[in-house]
Every structure is written in structure tokens, then in C-alpha cells.
Amino acid sequence: MYALIKSLSHRGLETFSVDVEADFSKGMPSFDIVGLGDAAIRESKDRIRSAFRNCGYTFPVARIVINLAPASMPKTGSMFDLPIFMALMAASEQIPMISEKSLFIGELSMSGRLNPVRGVLSKVIFAREHGFDSIFIPYKNAVQASAIGGINVYPAVTVSEIIDHLSDGPKIKPLAKCEFDDIAEETFSLDFCDVKGQESAKRAIEISAAGGHNLMMIGPPGSGKSMLAKRIPSILPQLTFEESLEVTGIYSICDSFSPDIKMRKIRPFRSPHHNASPASLIGGGANPNPGEISLSHHGVLFLDEIAEFPSHILESLRQPIEDKCVSLSRVSYRVTFPCNFQLIAAMNPCKCGFFGDSTHKCTCSESSVERYLSKISGPILDRFDLHVEVSAVKFSDLSGNSVSEDSESIRERVLAARNIQTERFAGTGISCNSDMPPNMIKEFCEMDDGAMKVLEKSFKAYSFSARTYDKVRKVARTIADLDNSEIILQNHLTEAIQYRLLERKYWKK
Ligand SMILES: Nc1ncnc2c1ncn2[C@@H]1O[C@H](COP(=O)(O)OP(=O)(O)OP(=O)(O)O)[C@@H](O)[C@H]1O
Ligand SMILES: [Mg+2]
Ligand SMILES: [Zn+2]
């Protein structure tokens, strides 16, 4: 007696199909699972036996072998409980043979309830793209799966519901597709109106959000750097459907996954501690898990107190920042996770925090300041398009009654600038100014004569590098977009250059 059930598994973000075969033969009753399964799969035998008993089905008495094919691919997790259960039911003829166009994924509890599994979103997409016509999943995974149309998705609370559906019992209603636009946008609790003063820092943040530029904030303790950074997601545009598929897909395969996560609309904001391990930042594990840099995909990675991060960790971020993806190699395979994030960093200029501050005296020696600043290497510093000083808040700003601008108003300007960029880069695969390659900088960063002269003068005066030359033009492009100007004017360029001068104050004296 033999039965075949189709199922799916994943390695990194990649989904692959798995055939679950059950074969019964005569001999001493036994139950073996072969096909490179991990401990969770070996343990599924006990869950399945109990589920059979507790749901009132007969566990077959035979020499049972379950094979998970392809046998060469290691398989992890508990999501094969359901397909193995179905294969045993079909091979023992307790249900009719099941179509090879149907897929089953789910973990079983001993009572026969279905527990949620990881990576359902990408599995439903895979199923639709590979011509399957139905997929049976645990009910708790339904929220994510409902975003994908074009395939019958059957959510079930217990395995008995599926057995009834496939026999002559009550039918499960397929999930209705939930349109992305109908998903309510989450509201953001932090707002820029809480931050008093700091107008120049807020302006730099607005530019950085508008053009997707990496931003570094330097200033004394308590000036509001962390406060400002945490409010950045409140002015960013919501994720597009395609971006949300990528982001939700990454979150759905994580260790820390929650089955309740819907399609995400707000951009991720991740703020790893400087003690974080390389694996938690970059990604790692036996069946590799995405790290913080991938969890920030299409959102913000905030490195608070960046000078406190060990230098080997900062250096390991260089490649992913450049490539916008990270590859993790294992003995026989490699997985790649995307990590196209906007990098925001904050730091004090020295150990005591007050170097260059007008209100407090810095107590550090010159060499100690130098040592502190040198923790940020040239190449890392180069990854930032904008450097901005966040000086101590003025008493008049804190005590005054003036109301600061709220996030909604800033966001409107950011969205207008982003719309200009969406139109500009339509069909190129690029979404914002910060991603422009050199040929596009040439094409899109047209300057008027005044701007050209300022650029030439400052290039000589500050001996800018070629990389800085490109960065200044990209930032100037964003400033011009915020000003709704097709051509980069002198004042746009002057402002862009200003965001390169801090580097000279602290690092290249
Ligand atoms: N501009 C501001 N307006 C209102 N409150 C502020 C402002 N700046 C700082 N604060 C208050 O000070 C607290 C500390 O600010 P925050 O943690 O952002 O400082 P920081 O610059 O990150 O300091 P550190 O360098 O020590 O990390 C905030 O939680 C807030 O209560
Ligand atoms: Mg801080
Ligand atoms: Zn100091």
C-alpha cells in the first residue's frame, strides 16, 4: 500500500516542493521516516500517533516507511506532520487518494489541532506559481495567506476538518482574498512634534527619508539623537505591495516569527544593541535565519552609539550595505537574504560626549578623542551621505510654548519627493535617489551655473574625493526634489555640501 502527498519546505527564503511518500509492507510493525529530516521531523512520529488516537482514526499496523523526497535536501521543522498524517490516512485507505495538485503543510498537536508553521506566505506564492490548485494550512496562518489570490487556500483548525473535507463530510470554505489596500495601516505612536528645537537635525532627517540616504548624527549626550531616530518610520512612505511581500516573507521565516503577522505596511525599524552577535546581525544558524540587516529590508537599520560596536562587526556590514544582500555559506549550499536598508547611526564625538560642545567642557585628552573617533573607519564613514551635528537642546526651545511640526506634515513633503523619484526611476528597478548609479547621476542631476560654480569651488577647497562628489550631487538632487525643482540650484547644492563638512571637523582636521 502506497500513497503520495505533496508538501513544501524552505531553505532561507527559497521554497522547494517535497514529496511525502508512505509505504506499508508486511513484517514487524514499525514507523520510520527517511529523507534527511531533523530532530523536529523525527519527533513528529509521536505527535502523529497521538493525533490518530485522539481523533478516532486507526493508526495502521504495518512496517511503515515515510520518505521525504528529494532525499538529498536537508529538511527542518515540524511542518511535515500534516502531510505525513495524510499520507498514512491515504495509504491505509481511510480516505480516498488525494490529487497531486493539492498541498499540505502544518504541525500537529497531540489532540489533532493544527499549529502554525513558518514561511506560509512564500509557500502559497510558490504553490500558485507552480500550478497547484489548493493548499491546506493551519488556521492560524490564514491572515498572511489571505493576501495571495489565485489559488484555493483551505485553513483548518484541526486535522479532522481536512479529513471531513476530503471525504463526504462538511467542506472547508476557501479563504477570501484580502486586498492589500484594505489592510488597515498601523498607526505610529512616536511623533516628531515631541522633539523640541533641533531644526537642522530634523531637516537632515527629512532629506534622508525623502531620498533614502544614510545618515550619521553626532552630538553630546541627551541632545535627542536616539529620540529623533526612533521617529523616522513615522515620516516614511508605506511599503508597496511588492515590498511588503518581500518584508513579510523575511519575517515569516524567522525564529521569532509570529503567525499573526499580517502583510506589513509600515517600514521595519530595527535597532540592534552594540553587544549583538555577528549571527544575529548578519544572519546565521544551521538552517540560516535572517539577521537584523535583513529584518531592516526596505526599512531602517539604526545603529545607536555606533562607536561602541566592535570594529569587526562594523566592517562586516560594509559588503551587505554595498550589495544590498547578504550570502551565508554552509558546507553544501548557500542562502542569500536581501538587505536593502537605510542606515541611520548616532554617536557621541568622544568618550565624555562633549567634544566640540559649546555648553560643556570636554574632559578627554586629544589622543583619547582621536582614538574614539577612529573607531569609525574611513570606509564606514563613507557609507553615509549626510552627517549632521545634533547639539544640546537650548533651554528656550525646551521651555518655550512653541509647537514643533508633527510627523504627518513632514511625511507629506517626503511623499511628494518620493513620488517625483518613482516617476523618474520608473522601470529601472531603482526606487530612490540614493540608489542612483553613476550614469544616472549624470543624467538626472542637472545643475544650473551657480550650483556648478559652488561645486567646483568646494571641490577644490575641501579636496573632496570622487565618491563625495557623487554623494553631494545625489543629496542635492533630493533637496531639489523636496523643493519641486527640476534643476539643482545653487542653494540646493550649498545645503548638500554642508552635510559633508562635519566629517572634516571631527575626522579630517
Ligand atoms: N529636543 C528634545 N526635545 C524634547 N526632549 C528631549 C530633546 N532632546 C532630548 N530630550 C529628552 O532627553 C531624553 C534623552 O534623549 P536621547 O536619548 O534621544 O539623547 P541622545 O542624544 O540619544 O543621548 P546619548 O548620546 O546619551 O545617547 C529624551 O528621552 C527626552 O526626554
Ligand atoms: Mg542615544
Ligand atoms: Zn570628551
Image (spheres, rainbow, N blue to C red):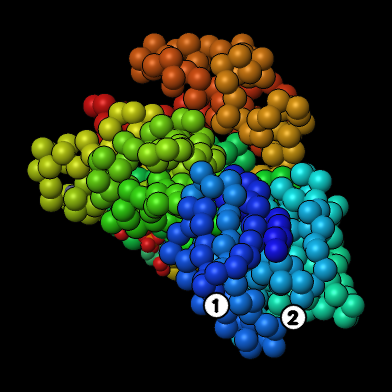
Whichever of callouts 1 and 2 sits on the residue coming sooner in the sequence is 1
Q: Residue at x 70, y 83 (%)?
A: 57
Whether residue 120 can be seen here: no
| Picture quarter with the N terminus | bottom right
Residue highlighted by disc 1:
47
Query: Picture coordinates of residue 249 (x, y %)?
Result: 62, 53
Distance from the alpha carbon under mark 1 to that under mark 2: 15 Å
Q: Nearer the viewer, residue 171 or 463?
A: 171
Any mark on residue 72, and which? none
Q: Is residue 208 left or right of residue 133?
A: left
Secondary element at image label 1: helix
Q: Which image quadrant for residue 23?
A: bottom right
The amino acid type of the residue labelled 1 equals Arg
The amino acid type of the residue labelled 2 equals Ser
Q: Which image quadrant for residue 129?
A: top right
Q: Nearer the viewer, residue 39 or 355?
A: 39
Secondary element at image label 2: helix
Indicate yes or no: mark 1 CB to ligand 2 under 8 Å: no
Q: Residue at x 32, y 40 (%)?
A: 314
Q: Nearer the viewer, residue 483 or 57?
A: 57
Q: Nearer the viewer, residue 35 or 328?
A: 35
Q: Is residue 156 left or right of residue 62?
A: right
Query: Picture coordinates of residue 195 (x, y %)?
Result: 50, 61
Q: Is residue 360 left or right of residue 47?
A: left
Residue highlighted by disc 2:
160
Quarter of the rendered image showing ligand 1: bottom left
Query: Picture coordinates of residue 163 (x, y %)?
Result: 78, 76
Tell me if mark 2 has few (under 14), some (14-19) or many (20+) residues whose alpha carbon lies within 10 angstroms of its own.
Answer: some
